[in-house]
Image (cartoon, grey):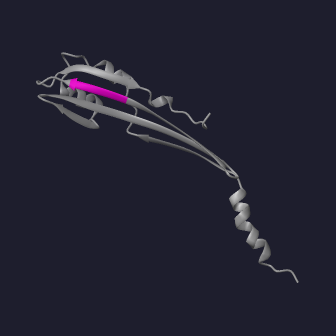
């Protein structure tokens, strides 16, 4: 007579040996529109106008009687592959970052921009 539980003992081992993979994508905040940034003119654009165009900043830094506002969008893509005892995982995080600097009167003095959020890609370590 055959033991009906014997094949069930092999099931956990088989599940451990099966390969697996996953893809994941996440974003924080909406992408920053480059067209909105073109309207920010040092010496003329006010803090109110910046807030109307870009919304609330992610971070406000006090610089004595001046301020700097940070706007940020982050895009992350992950991929992984698991084969027997080997696991490979790749993560690519790219960001849009905009720093807007204001003088004591609340007028824009400088704008620093990096727009790389759409450059994130899937891939395994190479």
Quadrant where the C terminus is found in the figure: top right
Residue 40: % across, % down: 26, 20
Which secondary structure type mostly characterizes the magenta part of the structure? strand
Quadrant assignment, res 104: top left
Residue 100: % across, % down: 26, 25
Q: Give whichever of 10, 105 is nearer the camera.
A: 10
The residue under the point 22% across, 16% down is 42
Residue 38 sits inside the magenta stretch: no
Residue 116: % across, % down: 44, 27
In the image, 53: left or right of 32?
left
The count of marks equals 0
**First to last magenta residue range:** 97-101
Q: Does residue 56 appear in this view?
A: no
The residue under the point 29% across, 30% down is 54
Quadrant where the N terminus is found in the figure: bottom right
Quadrant assignment, res 72: top left
Query: Is residue 44 shown above or below 120?
Result: above
The residue under the point 70% across, 52% down is 84
Query: Is residue 91 shown above or below 49?
Result: below
Quadrant assignment, res 96: top left
Residue 97: % across, % down: 36, 29
């Amino acid at each position: 007579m055959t033991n009906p539980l014997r094949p069930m003992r092999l099931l956990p081992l088989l599940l451990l040996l099966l390969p697996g993979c996953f893809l994941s994508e996440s974003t924080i905040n909406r992408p920053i529109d480059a067209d909105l940034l073109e309207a920010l003119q040092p010496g003329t654009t006010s803090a109110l106008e910046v807030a109307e165009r870009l919304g609330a900043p992610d971070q406000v830094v006090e610089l004595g009687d001046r301020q700097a506002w940070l706007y940020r969008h982050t895009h992350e893509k992950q991929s992984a592959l698991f084969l027997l005892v080997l696991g490979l995982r790749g993560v690519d995080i790219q960001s849009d970052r905009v720093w807007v600097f204001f003088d004591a009167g609340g007028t824009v003095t400088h704008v620093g921009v990096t727009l790389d959020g759409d450059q994130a890609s899937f891939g395994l370590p190479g």
